[in-house]
Image (tube, rainbow, N blue to C red):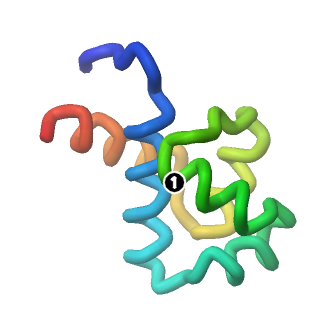
Amino acid sequence: MRLAREPQPELGKALRRLRTKAGVTQEQLEQRTGVHRTWISKTEQGHNNPAWGTVLKMIEGLGVSLGELVALIEQIELE
């Protein structure tokens, strides 16, 4: 696994893919997690570096495991 200098872009892409795969809007994810939709949007765009707790809230709100998120990030890094 390549260590990215800035992990936000890959993390954001992975979260967006998981959210769209789940058929969840940013507004719905906001309701599930309490994370504001503009923060979700900026995170998905790679502009925010979310705290660990925020990442955990988001994957819980999407119904995916940490392992699924990490595997997807690794896949995106290889693209």
Residue 38 lies, in percent from the top left, at: 71, 62
Count of numbered marks: 1
On the image, which quarter does residue 34 sit in?
bottom right
Report the side of 16 relative to 63 (left or right): left
On the image, which quarter does residue 17 sit in?
bottom left
Name the residue at 58% across, 82% down: 25
Residue 5 lies, in percent from the top left, at: 40, 14
Q: Decide: is 72 above or below 34.
A: above
Q: Decide: is 23 above or below 70.
A: below
Name the residue at 45% across, 62% down: 16
Q: Farthest residue to the right: give it.
A: 34
Name the residue at 81% across, 78% down: 31
Report the side of 40 relative to 1 (left or right): right
Pick the front one: 59 or 51: 51
* The N terminus - image quarter: top left
Amino acid tagged 1 = Glu
Q: Secondary structure at mark 1?
A: helix
Residue 7 lies, in percent from the top left, at: 46, 27
Name the residue at 13% across, 41% down: 79
Q: Which class describes the residues within 10 Å of circle 1: few (<14), some (14-19), or many (20+)?
A: many
Residue 18 lies, in percent from the top left, at: 43, 65
Q: Which residue is mark 1?
A: 44
Report the side of 34 relative to 13 (left or right): right
On the image, which quarter does residue 76 sit in?
top left
Q: Decide: is 36 above or below 57.
A: below
